[in-house]
Amino acid sequence: MSEIGSDDLKAMLLAIAGRIADSRERLNRLDAALGDGDHGASISAAFEKAAAEVDVLRDPLPSDIWLTTAQSLMNGMGGASGALFGTLFLKGVAPIHGKERLNKADFDELWRASLAGVKARGKAVIGDKTMVDALEPAVLAFAAKDNIADAWAAAAEAASYGAESTRELIARQGRARYLGQRGIGHQDPGATTIALMFEALDSYWREMTNGKT
Ligand code: ADP
Ligand code: MG
């Protein structure tokens, strides 16, 4: 099993939405410490809506699933991160456009484009205490593995480590930058959401391949 079709991709989005919904309160608490406390509520509602919209697509291509998700996140979520999470999915559409199944190389291109899009839109770099601190290491770790199962696992681990690394940082982007030093000791909520996303993808992949091999 080395290629992913639309049914699995739909299920992967549902898995992301489920994982984020389960973490709603934790994400709200993290954002209460560093921002305005809405991140868990808004990201979980936005992914729930995206998953519902994806679920009713008929015979979608992978790029249709990614585009619907992007549009739903952009429309369904206010604030800085609605546009950024929307961009993350939107920039993944072109590299997979028209493909019926996605292989490791397709995901490499997808994630690379997503990362570039988020960085261009938000102007954050590694160390700014944002979602980029989880996303960039995850994308690099994914690309560094040859096989897709190893790539999901490595990406999830790197994202989680990256999210944890934000705890000791002083924010240079987003609302948390107004806190300066006082933000030290608190993990960035957006980076945590990225880690949850890659954890959900890795878990889904492992469950799926265990069942089929
Ligand atoms: P808001 O700050 O508008 O309330 P959220 O609470 O939903 O939005 O999301 C906050 C998260 O957005 C932060 O934890 C951070 O990861 C991310 N973020 C904010 N600004 C930027 C940026 N310029 N680039 C990348 N990520 C950012
Ligand atoms: Mg917020």
Image: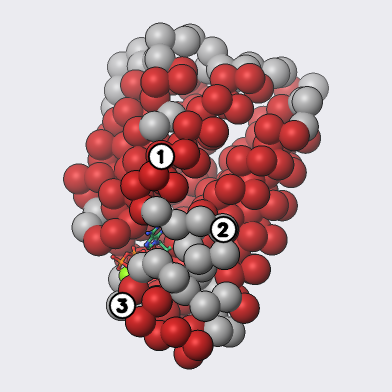
Alpha carbon distance from label 2 to label 3: 22 Å
Q: Earlier in the sequence, mark 2 or mark 3?
A: 3
Q: Secondary structure at mark 3?
A: loop
The answer to which quarter of the image holds residue 124 is bottom left
> How far across and how far down the image is residue 142, in percent?
68, 37
- The residue identified by callout 3 is 36
Q: Earlier in the sequence, mark 1 or mark 2?
A: 1
Q: Nearer the viewer, mark 2 or mark 3?
A: 2
Q: Left or right of 52: which side holds 179?
A: right
106 is higher (above) or lower (below) than 152: above
- The residue identified by callout 1 is 117
102 is higher (above) or lower (below) than 208: above
Whether ligand 1 has any atom under 8 Å from the Cβ at mark 2 is answered as: no
Alpha carbon distance from label 1 to label 2: 14 Å
> How far across and how far down the image is residue 115, in percent?
49, 41
Residue 126 numbered tag: 2
Q: Secondary structure at mark 2?
A: loop
The reply to whether the C-beta atoms of the residues labelled 2 and 3 are less than 8 Å apart is no
Image quarter (top left, top right, bottom left or bottom right) of the C terminus: top right
Image quarter (top left, top right, bottom left or bottom right) of the N terminus: top right
The answer to whether residue 11 is visible is no
Residue drawn at x 33%, y 57% is 81
Residue drawn at x 71%, y 27% is 148
Q: Secondary structure at mark 1?
A: helix
Residue drawn at x 48%, y 63% is 130
